Amino acid sequence: MKRRVVLLLLAAVAIAVSVDFVGEGRAADSAESSADLALGGPSVQALPADALPVDARPVAAVAPVRPIPRRWEGSWSSSLAGLFHGTLQTELPDPFPVGESFSCTATVRYAEDSLYHPGKYDIYRVEGRYDPEAKADATLVLTAAKGDQVLTFTGRLSAAGDTIEGRYSSKGPFDRGSFEARREP
């Protein structure tokens, strides 16, 4: 790493100026003093970038876009038992890191009138992955586990990037249904 930094600094200086020592018999122009000529002083001129070895050429440093957490809220509803439903809240990265895993926390709450755990909520640690080239119905996959329960949410991000709609499945207890979530502005 240290060697690369030194090479980059040297390359930047070499591109800015190149030192061409004045040889004998060269007439002095008004920019160079006779003392410079007598001592073989420097004359500054540009050096083309392709004259440098590939390792010494400056590399444009592009800072990666760092995702920031954005709050998402939505609802879920069981397709097996219509009275199992509730809300969900989470913070997902914005923008989604394409093809890379990310982690977040999600709160899944059962509605007050839900037959199963009315008013109860659980906080899950979630692992996610976003792949816009994946199957049309599963560009975003979120997997949450707590105890014996494993929830898998598969959804599609809207073209505007502010809505996710999809399906979920649960093991321990078994369930499946649909969900939707909106990013808060």
Image (cartoon, rainbow, N blue to C red):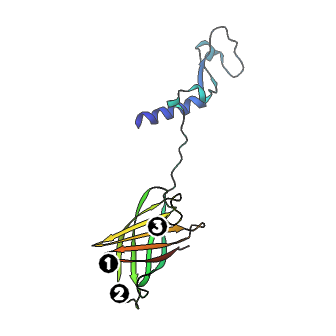
Judge the density around disc 1: few (<14), some (14-19), many (≥20) Cα neighbours within 10 Å: few
Q: Earlier in the sequence, mark 2 or mark 3?
A: 3
In the picture of the structure, the residue carrying the numbered disc 3 is: 92
Q: Which residue is mark 2?
A: 116
Q: Amino acid at mark 1?
A: Pro
Measure the C-alpha gap from mark 1 to mark 3.
25 Å
Judged by depth in the image, the label closer to the viewer, 1 or 3, is 1
Is 106 displayed left or right of 26 in the figure? left
**What's under tag 3, amino acid-wise?**
Leu
In the depicted view, which residue is nearer to us: 136 or 3?
Answer: 136
Q: Residue at x 56, y 28 (%)?
A: 14
Q: CA distance from mark 2 to mark 3?
A: 27 Å
For the N terminus, the quadrant is top left
Find the residue positioned furthest to the top: 25
Residue furthest left as drawn: 147
Quarter of the image that includes the C terminus = bottom right
Whether the residues at callouts 1 and 2 have beta carbons within 8 Å, the answer is: yes
Choose the circle earlier in sequence order: 1 or 2: 2
Left or right placement of residue 48 versus residue 82 in this view? right
The residue closer to the viewer here, 32 or 157, is 157
Marks 1 & 3, CB-CB < 8 Å contact: no
Closer mark to the observer between disc 2 and disc 3: 2
Question: Gap in Å between the C-alphas at discs 1 and 2?
Answer: 11 Å
Q: Residue at x 55, y 31 (%)?
A: 13
Looking at the picture, does residue 35 appear above or below residue 1? above
